[in-house]
Amino acid sequence: MEKTEILKKFLEKGLQLDYESLDYFSKNQEKINPFFQRILNSEKPATLSLNFILSLLKPYDENVEILKTSHLTKNTLSVDDITKILNNRYSFLKKILSSRLDLINPISLNKITPKVKYFSAIVMVKEKINEENAIIVEDETVESKLYIDKEEDYKQILPDDVIGVVCEGGEKIKVKTIMWPDLQMKRTVSKTKEDINVGLVSKEFDKNLAESILKQKNVKHLLFIGSDGKITYSNDTQFEFNSPSTIRIEKAIVILLSNSELLKKYSEFNIDENTFLISVLKRRNLDPTFQLNKGFFEADPYLVDIVPDIFVVSGTKNSSSNNYKGTTIITLSDFAQDRKFWIINLKTRETINASLD
């Protein structure tokens, strides 16, 4: 962003930058959204000085960095806002899919002619037509109707999914293969050099419970994920942020945290939680079907643009620990159900379903 755009963004929120502050945000644009979140509950000076900004951006805990969190900047959506969100998702996921070598003869939808027999395209699903096992899709050029060969493939597709399709042309264009943005098959499993335990609890923050877990279980970092979407970090310090969020702990381990409320609208999640959570990572999108009742986020919190080492979902029917392509997936049933929580060792990546003595 140019400096004029940064100034406009701050002025829209009733905030005035001095020259040093503007220069700082111009060079550190990734700090803008975290600053907006921090200042919500702070007293706002008439003009923001650099000292005020740096004090507000000071880490709560030097070993915990919030990379991305759910921070609404607007409660209502315009047509331009919706277009921007969907275009950003499409562009990001298309870039990933474009690297797939098995997307043969990739073309845009407006280039399809009766002479094109085999081709690939990267599309966003606009509509499903159950009676025909067909989908209406679009790219940057036009819309098109595709017929899915395999019933199982058709069932997996959700509205607004961004997918790669390998097709056979003809009177009806048939999709032979579907590809997802997915995680890389080969990637280094991140670990800390020392034994460091993280505790994960599906519950609103409870000070007495936090003190007991930290004391009894040799836990350094403790995270409560409430049904209201509030995530509370606790050890010597305590602070809150919103679900879903992506954080980095010990400068090494990326953790994606979410409660299950946004997933319960999907029947696939309610039938088989673990399978759907793997499909979410394949999609690189926690909430693929766009809803108009959501507000506008500067940084889309649902898009999995930062690959997590650990993916945590609270408020699920079952508690489990699984692995998908180097990402540990942990589901947390409500603490009130069985009085249990998870501990994960960041050095060994071992997970333990624990309870208090």
Image (cartoon, rainbow, N blue to C red):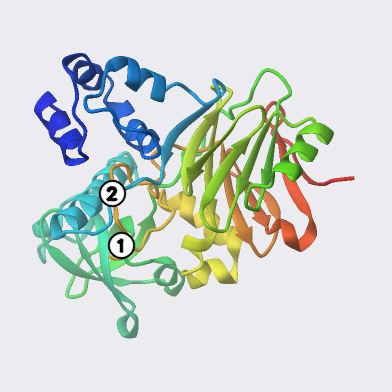
User: Three-letter amino acid code at disc 1?
Assistant: Asp
Q: Which mark is residue 298?
A: none
| Residue 179 left/right relative to 225 | left
Q: Residue at x 34, y 42 (%)?
A: 100
Q: Residue at x 24, y 59 (%)?
A: 76
**2 and 1 marks in contact (CB < 8 Å):** yes
Mark 2 crowdedness (10 Å alpha carbons): few <14, some 14-19, many ≥20: many
| Residue 271 left/right relative to 356 | left
| Quadrant housing the N terminus | top left
Residue 313 screen position, x and y as percent: 58, 52
User: Three-letter amino acid code at disc 2?
Assistant: Arg
Which quadrant of the view contains residue 62? top right
Mark 1 crowdedness (10 Å alpha carbons): few <14, some 14-19, many ≥20: many
**Depth check: 264 or 295 in front?**
295
Helix, strand or loop status at disc 1: loop
Q: Residue at x 31, y 28 (%)?
A: 30
**Depth check: 340 or 115 in front?**
340
27 vs 135: above or below: above
Residue 127 screen position, x and y as percent: 27, 72
Which quadrant of the view contains residue 141? bottom left
Question: Along the polypeptide, which appears first: circle 2 or circle 1?
Answer: 2
- Residue 187 shows up from this direction: no
Give the residue number, with chain letter if any, for mark 2.
89
Residue 140 screen position, x and y as percent: 14, 53
Direction bottom: furthest residue: 131
| Residue 308 left/right relative to 145 | right
Give the residue number, with chain letter if any, for mark 1.
160
- Residue 78 shows up from this direction: yes
Residue 222 screen position, x and y as percent: 66, 37
Helix, strand or loop status at disc 2: helix
Q: Residue at x 34, y 78 (%)?
A: 133
